[in-house]
Amino acid sequence: MFYPEPIAKLIDAFSRLPGVGPKTAGRLAFHVLRMKEDDVLDFAKSLVSVKRNLHYCSVCCNITDVDPCRVCQDKSRDASVICVVQEPKDLVALERMKEFNGYYHVLHGAISPMEGIGPDEIRIAELLKRLGDDTVQELILAMNPNVEGEATTMYISRLVKPFGLRVTRIAHGLPVGGDLEYADEVTLSKALEGRRELS
Amino acid sequence: MFYPEPIAKLIDAFSRLPGVGPKTAGRLAFHVLRMKEDDVLDFAKSLVSVKRNLHYCSVCCNITDVDPCRVCQDKSRDASVICVVQEPKDLVALERMKEFNGYYHVLHGAISPMEGIGPDEIRIAELLKRLGDDTVQELILAMNPNVEGEATTMYISRLVKPFGLRVTRIAHGLPVGGDLEYADEVTLSKALEGRRELS
């Protein structure tokens, strides 16, 4: 209103980000005004680059700039295990632990009837395709420990029953209601150790 | 490290912003990934536009996309009063009050020997130029109520003494140690009312 249009627009853009209110947005916009032009250009480029250069891996559906992604390209991993996670951030959290040596599958969400997200909205079909041959022997379900994650775990475990795989879930060592992404390495490691077969 | 390069770069760019830690930066970057491409392009454009299309007003030194700025162009204002503020955000805070009808001067900082900011680093010379003719009769100093603002107030009030102006300061109705930008309209209005002549 009282700001010149370019900065008003930037404040508006910042305030659309999650957790950024109008005052924080103003502070960020004025910070940008004081940044070096090259740094601002880099920032702008990296914004666009994320949208233009990132795609989904044709194997595991993780976000990647090469296809297949770096994890799927890594032949030293154990092809008999696939760990299913909700989000790319969850994969990163598990990788940070440096203990899991199988492959991943990223669902990009969880089943949530409340939000109108059914099994077709997340990458379950792509997961089933990967179970076609006999390579995969264990499926580790590492959903977030909340209602949606639970629903997704149950749905997938029933769906893949005909494949005769070992289907496990990471243990409820994670604090219920929390986010997998923020769990520390030890908790994650304990959760992976304590996984149990779905009856 | 585990993220594909484009998103790692964006996380890095976000985490350089003030008050944004690595986890918030990650959340923001993944939010961008889920935004519509057009919205991301707009965001990137507004970032660059702030650097490229905003300049300093040749009269009051406020940031503006037109020169002189919209306030300085407004002939209905009282040319006999100039209100001196530290930052463009302070000007916006005063404008929001809708009570002040004079012109402004934006210093872009305050004198701070601790940070090596002397009178030459802020827009004091530009202010003196505006006092050359007899149009301006009162100078209202509206600095932040802290050590730097105080130093700037005293410096300017002594500097402009030869011009024979009425030099006032907004009252200390503002909570000391706070930021002018965040004061509510009533407090600002009281502060403006209670201004007193510097001896």
Image (cartoon, coloured by chain):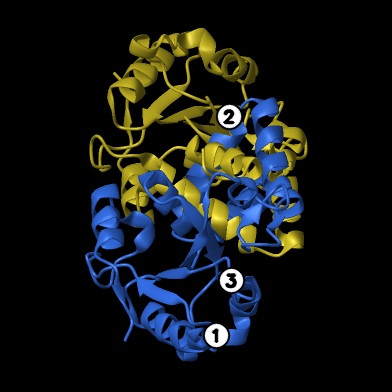
Chain colours: A yellow, B blue
Residue A17 x %, y %: 49, 38
Determine if residue B136 is in view: yes
On the image, numbered disc 2 is attached to which residue? B34
Which residue type carries mark 1?
Ile
A176 over B185 or under it: above or below: above
Q: Quadrant of residue B116?
A: bottom right
Q: Quadrant of residue B132?
A: bottom right
Q: Are marks 1 and 3 on the same chain?
A: yes
Residue shown at 51%/62% (left/top)? B80
Numbered disc in front, either 3 or 2: 3
Q: Which quarter of the rendered picture does the C terminus of chain B lie within? A: bottom left
Secondary structure beneath dot 2 equals helix
User: Which amino acid type is marked by label 2?
Assistant: Arg
Q: Residues within 10 Å of mark 1 (few under 14, many from 20)?
A: some
Label 1 or label 3, whichever comes before in sequence order: 1
**Mark number for residue B117?**
1
What residue sits 29% from the left and 37% below the top? A171
Distance of label 1 from label 3 (alpha carbons): 30 Å
Provide the residue designation for mark 3.
Answer: B134
Asked which secondary structure carries label 3, the reply is loop
What quarter of the picture does the N terminus of chain B occupy?
bottom right
Q: Are marks 3 and 2 on the same chain?
A: yes
Residue B93 picture location, percent across and down: 41, 52
- For mark 1, name the chain: B
Q: CA distance from mark 1 to mark 2?
A: 43 Å
